[in-house]
Image: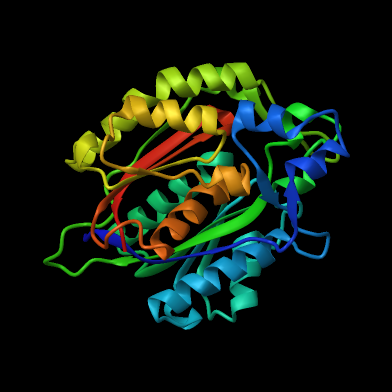
Amino acid sequence: MTGSRVVALGHYQPAKVLTNDDLTAMVDTSDEWITSRVGIRTRHVAGPDEPVDELAAHAGAKALAAAGLTPADIDLVLVATSTAINRSPNMAARVAARLGMGSPAVMDLNVVCSGFTHALATADHAVRAGSATRALVIGADKMAEIADWTDRTTCVLVGDGAGAAVVEACPQDAEPGIGPVLWGSVPEMGHAVRIEGTPPRFAQEGQSVYRWATTQLPPIARKVCERAGVTPEELAAVVLHQANLRIIEPVAQKIGAVNAVIARDVVDSGNTSAASIPMALSKLVERGEIESGAPVLLFGFGGNLSYAGQVIRCP
């Protein structure tokens, strides 16, 4: 068994941008109301001819290009999503077909907003166990398609997009680039974040989620750092699920990552569910805000109420 590492990242967002002012023509809201409560100013929205697998494939192709790899180099594709309307072929198979891959294993993971960190851990485990050598891990969601555009408490939150990471085995003499995962859930509170009905619609109990996230998650995130052998003060960046700025900032502060860059992509992109962490991380790396090899905390949380986190070394 050997460790794994993230060697490249990529992200993609649809061209259409929906501003807070645009939303005022749709529901009873205002720019001030939205920014003061959730910190979001804009979000990208996919059209009816832009399915989830297309968003995912764009992000995956960029990650492969950044790694200097071809689709044939990948033997495992994992797509984290909760907005795959069709059950089969799954999103991973559709992405593999779009990218012209050979015969990779293809799996979807539906753990909603913590889907990417669950998928990243799954890829790490597969590499460590020897069942995969190189994986393409993608978080992709089309939240605008499942939004209730008459509910001003939820429709102002959501956006669409995808983020991807290429994961491969570390050299035998190298330290693992993906630390141990800490994951779990609070099943009795699973109803607090829901995508239910026909057609499916996103709903949540905002205050319950806020209290859980801001009080229960910081000690868990510190435990993630402990498992990785890193103190919060040593973190170069913290990339939390981009749910709401009023959750991100207090949680980051309570973790104690005083020297870290805090991802705030939610301001420009909204809540993109499983896409939020890889997309925010990819943008930080693209802008040169994190040095290669620096420790970064990834921590997803949300639906079920599930959580999963790990410390990775920046590619």
Q: Is residue 25 visible?
A: yes
Relative height, residue 87 to residue 185 (above, below) = below
- Quarter of the image holding residue 11? bottom right
Q: Residue at x 54, y 74 (%)?
A: 61
Q: Is residue 111 visible?
A: no
Q: Which quadrant would the C terminus be assigned to in this image?
A: bottom left
Name the spot of residue 65 as percent of width and height, x first: 46, 78
Name the spot of residue 185 as percent of width and height, x first: 47, 28
- Quarter of the image holding residue 153? top right
Q: Residue at x 17, y 41 (%)?
A: 229
Front residue of 58 and 185: 58
Q: Residue furthest front?
A: 32
Relative height, residue 185 to residue 40 (above, below) = above
The count of marks equals: 0
Left/right of residue 237 with respect to residue 190 in the rendered view: left
Name the spot of residue 85 as percent of width and height, x first: 76, 51
Name the spot of residue 66 as percent of width and height, x first: 42, 75
- Quarter of the image holding residue 132? bottom left
Q: Residue at x 61, y 63 (%)?
A: 56
